[in-house]
Amino acid sequence: MSNLTENKLNVVLTAADVTAINTNVNTINAKLPIGILNEDQRANYKAIDVGNKVFSEDVVTELAISGAGIMPAFINGAFIQTDLSFFEQMDALEANLMNTVQRVRDLKRIAGHEAYSMSLAVYKIYECANAAGIPGAKQAYDKLKARFDAQGRPSDGTEA
């Protein structure tokens, strides 16, 4: 359990910063071609791992060396090369964005942890104040305890 007085984050982004971040995310999305898969396509499209990538690179090399007399006209090695180049670009972009997403998730987790942990401490103080008969504590305690009223009871509303 963390120290309640420790507050790793005590910041709120300015409206301008939120707008700038969202604008930049929208810019990224606008620069990317449309390529949205449905669930069936996601399940059935072949993935490319390191071995498959090396294989595809070898195919491009072989097509450049000896493909002219062997491959039919409908096989376009330039398409494979273009797709591989784009794959590499998307792979690097994905890694960068995943690092950003992880950072956002971590910041969100820290902020949520700090807010909820301190809220639980405040609730416990109201609980003690209510038990001690401190004026004004009962109304706040009753409102806050509603969060926990259903816990530990059967879902049909009867007492456990």
Image (spheres, rainbow, N blue to C red):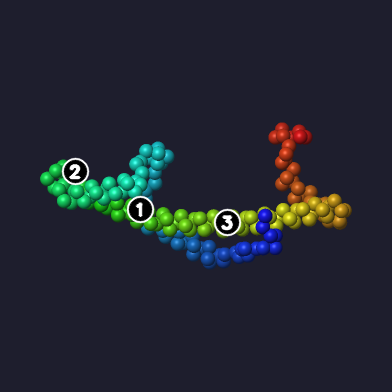
Q: Is residue 88 left or right of residue 68?
A: right
Circle 1 packing at 10 Å, graded few (<14), some (14-19), many (20+), is: few
Circle 3 packing at 10 Å, graded few (<14), some (14-19), many (20+), is: few
Q: How many marks?
A: 3
Circle nearer the N terminus (1, 3): 1
Label for residue 74? 2
Residue at 16% over, 51% down: 65
The spot of residue 88 in percent (x, y) is 33, 54
Residue at 64% over, 55% down: 113
Q: What amino acid is found at the position of numbered circle 1 in the picture?
A: Pro
Query: Disc 1 marks which residue?
Result: 33
SS for tag 1?
Answer: loop
The spot of residue 14 in percent (x, y) is 57, 66
Q: What amino acid is found at the position of numbered circle 3 in the picture?
A: Lys
The spot of residue 84 in percent (x, y) is 29, 51
Along the line of sight, the residue nearer the viewer: 55 or 111: 55
Query: Disc 3 marks which residue?
Result: 108
